[in-house]
Amino acid sequence: MKNFLLIFSLFFISMSFGQEFKAKSIFINNILESYKWNKRILLFIANESDIALIKKVNNFFITHKCKNEERNLELLKIIKDNTKHIIIPNYYENKKGIWLIGYDGYIKAYTKNGSLLSKLHNLIDNMPIRKEEQERIKSNC
């Protein structure tokens, strides 16, 4: 399972830099389901032409690495112009933006632009499960 997630992460990283990756079809629903109750997901869907937003999301995950890891937040990035091998669920198929998906697999927040990033940690910190995590685990950031 861990190897699959690593390959999946590498696939999305390679897509964001325009490199071609030859693999069997990847079903986003299956990926999201595999993270259920294990990770919070920031699902990012954009076109290659959304350069500013792609940079903003990448920078957010580099700059706030510790805070994101502490909140058990995983970035799943889909750059639509390179989705030959990705099966996107109908709900997301013709949409772009950023979705916060909770442990339960439900969407907690959505934005078409990067505005969600500025309030993301606060939003997560106000979730009941996160409050329990904060009581059990001391912050390292």
Image (tube, helix red, strand yellow):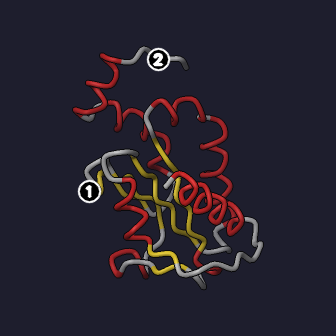
**Which residue in the structure is indicated by mark 2?**
139
Q: Residue furthest bottom?
A: 84
Q: Secondary structure at mark 1?
A: loop
The residue at the point 32 percent across, 53 percent down is: 36
x and y percentages locating residue 3 in the rendered image: 58, 55
x and y percentages locating residue 81 in the rendered image: 63, 81
Q: Quadrant of residue 121 in the image?
A: top left
Above or below: residue 134 compared with residue 124: above
Residue type, mark 1 in image:
Tyr
Q: Quarter of the image containing the C terminus?
A: top right
Residue type, mark 2 in image:
Ser
Q: Secondary structure at mark 2?
A: loop
x and y percentages locating residue 95 in the rendered image: 43, 75
* 129, 33: nearer the viewer: 33
Other residues around mark 1 within 10 Å, as few (<14) / some (14–19) / many (≥20): few
Q: Quadrant of residue 49 in the image?
A: bottom right
Above or below: residue 28 compared with residue 135: below
* 32, 90: nearer the viewer: 32
* In-image side of 36 versus 73 (left or right): left
**Which residue in the structure is indicated by mark 1?**
106
The residue at the point 52 percent across, 30 percent down is: 67
Q: Disc 2 and disc 1: Cα gap in Å?
A: 26 Å
Label 1 near label 2: C-beta < 8 Å?
no
* In-image side of 66 versus 59 (left or right): left
Other residues around mark 2 within 10 Å, as few (<14) / some (14–19) / many (≥20): few
Q: Quadrant of residue 62 in the image?
A: top right
> Which circle marks residue 53 in the picture?
none
First along the sequence among labels 2 and 1: 1
The residue at the point 55 percent across, 60 percent down is: 4
Above or below: residue 39 compared with residue 106: above
x and y percentages locating residue 20 in the rendered image: 75, 77
